[in-house]
Image: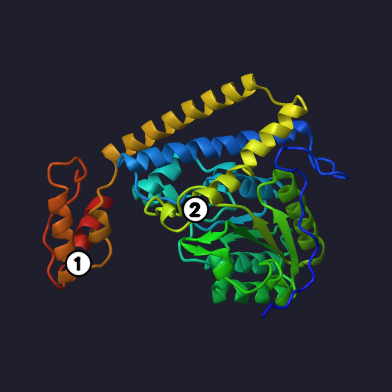
Amino acid sequence: MKGFTFEIPPRVTFLDEEGTLIAGRSPPMTDAKACELYRHMIRSRLFDDRLLKLQRQGRIGTFAPSFGQEACQVGSLAALTAKDWFVPSFREMAGALFRGAPMKSILLYAMGYEEGSVVPKDARDLPVSIPVGGQSAHAVGLAWAMKLKKDPGIAICYFGDGATSEGIVYESMNFAGVLRLPTIFFCQNNQWAISTPRRSQTACETIAQKGIGAGIEARQVDGNDLFAVYHATTEAAALARSTGMSTLIEAITFRRGVHTTADDPSVYRTKAEEEAWAKKDPIDRMRKHLTKKGAWSDAQQTKAEEEIIAETQQAIAEAEAFRESGPSPLLMFDHTFSWMPPYLQRQRDEAEASFAGRDVLVGVSTKKQGAGSQAVVGELEEAKD
């Protein structure tokens, strides 16, 4: 039985797959700005590719690539200001880079160091959020606080198609709708929630229409079209600032790589599907458009790539230097409790044994802690001295 269909505006598109403007459309930004945003997209793509190689070499831990979703993140954040809150999930590396997160910090987080989660001073950015959909409540809380303080900012939160099946996402949209909170809910519908396809995620014809039940605006855009994303987010931001009305934006895109580096998409999706979406790639599309207009050249591409690769190499060197002299992984055991439970002591002993002979235990006490021990407290007090 076919499900109910609710009315939402037609999908927003500016560029076709060959980078040609759709009839009746004009670019929503200057060529100079388009080139700037395009460079941000390739910066993310190249860094993402380098991270994957580092993970395969065992130099960083697992991470979630943003490969194929660069236009969603760069295009939406470019439509906002530094006074607006950026609330990511775990796949918004392109957005984090655009907002000024250092490459070194992203590397440190992937290495397992919480120092990588430190947000630059005065930045209205939240760190990575792993629980699926939970960050939507954080964004609404920020929007509510801004409303109470008469702060003109808005909050934008990101999640995937799978997160729309989580109760907290709808509850957050409902809360924002009732209280008229300036929030943009940005769903990157990349067609796969790990191995669950979009068709098995919801009976709704679109994800965008889920916003209607919460009494907020709903838009669907071509998420591989930088101009379309920028335009739709600009409109949503203007609506939020002028009326407090929230918007759910569903951006149709595709996760071109793995869900995380622990994933193998060949198990659940076909090469044909991947090849079809490769033709819709957001970076290729934008490059074709800018090249046709004479705003971008092969020489500019080469120069940009060389600069980004050099920047990446420097960040890797700095992150690995931190690891050589930085805190030991055993600190996660030593500073969790004022006394260490036996089960945790066993885990610590196992970890310490596995690190034997490696330069990761510098400066860390190996004192045994029984129940009721105050050894950790003593070590902390010594550190203060």
Give the x, y percent position of residue 315: 43, 33
Give the x, y percent position of residue 346: 14, 64
Write down the residue under mark 2.
Answer: 270
Amino acid found under the numbered disc labelled 1: Leu
**Res 213 → quadrant:** bottom right
Q: Quadrant of the N terminus?
A: bottom right
Say left or right for 335 vs 45: left
Give the x, y percent position of residue 179: 72, 75
**Residue sitting at 52 percent across and 58 percent down?**
89
| Residue 35 visible in this rendered orientation of the protein | no
| Image: 48 above or below 354 | above
How many numbered circles does the render carry?
Answer: 2
* Label annotation for residue 344: 1
**Residue sitting at 74 percent across and 62 percent down?**
219
**Residue sitting at 78 percent across and 28 percent down?**
293
* Label annotation for residue 179: none
Residue situated in front as seen by the camera: 355 or 202: 202
**Res 31 → quadrant:** top right
Say left or right for 131 vs 182: left
Give the x, y percent position of residue 92: 54, 51
Q: Residue furthest top?
A: 299
Say left or right for 80 vs 367: right
How dense is the environment of label 1, judged by Cα within 10 Å: few (below 14), some, or many (20 and up)? some
How dense is the environment of label 2, judged by Cα within 10 Å: few (below 14), some, or many (20 and up)? few
Residue situated in front as seen by the camera: 217 or 206: 206
Frontmost of labels 2 and 1 is 2
| Image: 166 above or below 113 | below
Sequence order check, earlier mark of 2 and 1: 2
Residue situated in front as seen by the camera: 358 or 190: 190
| Residue 297 visible in this rendered orientation of the protein | yes
Secondary structure at badge 2 equals: loop
